[in-house]
Image (cartoon, grey):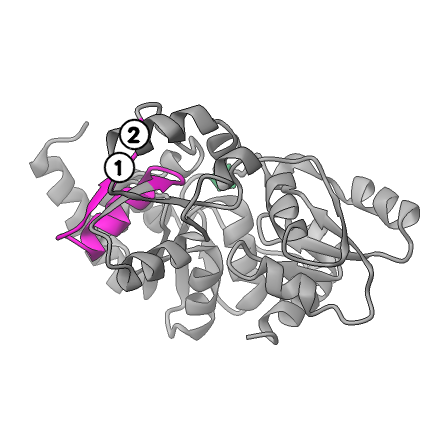
Amino acid sequence: MLSKKENEYLIEQITRLKQEKKAVILAHNYQRPEVLDIADIQGDSLELSRAAAKTEARVIVFCGVRFMAETASILCPDKVVLLPRADAACPLANHITVSQLNDLRQKYPQAVIVCYVNSSAEVKAASDICCTSANAIRVVNSLNGTKQVVMLPDQNLALHVAAHTDKEIIAWEGGCPAHCQLQAEEVRQMKAAYPRAKFMAHPECDQKVLELADCVTSTSGMLRYVDQSGAEEFIVGTEEGMIHVLQVAFPEKKFYHFPRPMICQDMKKITLASIVESLTKMQHVVSVPDEIRKPALECLSRMMKLG
Ligand code: SF4
């Protein structure tokens, strides 16, 4: 852990480098608190990419994992997208390859293939339409004339959608390690300890966990739910970084996380020091080659047109 003085020094460096390089810093809600605090924009992966597309900045420092930086590069190919740690990957996104996706297409020729935004650029390019945890149900139900849908790579999200659609959902068996670890028994214990608290769960959690939730939603949905809810206390069923985001947004409310914290190790790889290094050396540039970028952009655009 760095001292206050060391932190302040790094923040000064980041402020100077940002001006010098005309850069903007985007941070996903699961980043370390000190990274979230210095970010120009915080949010979920799609909110950040949309923000990236609108920014005047020449350089985007994406504090997140690789598929998010790829999405920013797909949406704004004229900008330099930096991922401060080259090894910040998403195990869920890496759970399916294009060759496995092509096997699914052969096996289910009538099905529409919906990929979660947590997927590689190559997988997006080979899919029909993208979805996020916030709009997955809406995306699937918008597929008029389609009876069968393959959803990948997150099985829990697919099962959650299956409960809210008449379409047949074929789920790929991938999962997020941080969200899959949460057990229903841990939720019951927290509810007993904080009986007035509302339980919010991310759809990447197990179905038995989701059954106990007052609200199943994305991280951006959690912010809206807390804002609109009359409740004062909340149990937060997603990666622990979200507690900081919620606590800063609603200082008068209480947020509880689980004794066995849900931590995404890859998100936590990025530190203030790695951001300084990234901007100084202009590393690690993430760019998607045109032959992948164009079909991946179509896949994302079909979703974005739904609003
Ligand atoms: S929290 Fe899970 S889905 Fe999100 S980046 Fe980490 S491993 Fe991937």
Horizontally, residue 19 falls left or right of residue 260, namely left
Looking at the rendered structure, the kind of residue marked 1 is Pro
Spot occupied by residue 111 in the image (x, y as percentages of width and height): 84, 56
Element at label 2: helix
Range of the magenta residues? 236-258
Position of the N terminus, as image quadrant, is: top left
Choose top left, top right, bottom left or bottom right for residue 237: top left
Whether residue 77 is visible to the viewer of this picture, yes or no, is: no
Q: Nearer the viewer, residue 200 or 306?
A: 200
- Residue 113 vertical position relative to residue 304 in the rendered view, above or below: above
Spot occupied by residue 246 in the image (x, y as percentages of width and height): 26, 51
Choose top left, top right, bottom left or bottom right for residue 186: top left
Which residue is under mark 2?
Answer: 192
Which residue is under mark 1?
Answer: 195
Choose top left, top right, bottom left or bottom right for residue 192: top left
Spot occupied by residue 113 in the image (x, y as percentages of width and height): 77, 55
Whether residue 194 is visible to the viewer of this picture, yes or no, is: yes
Looking at the rendered structure, the kind of residue marked 2 is Ala
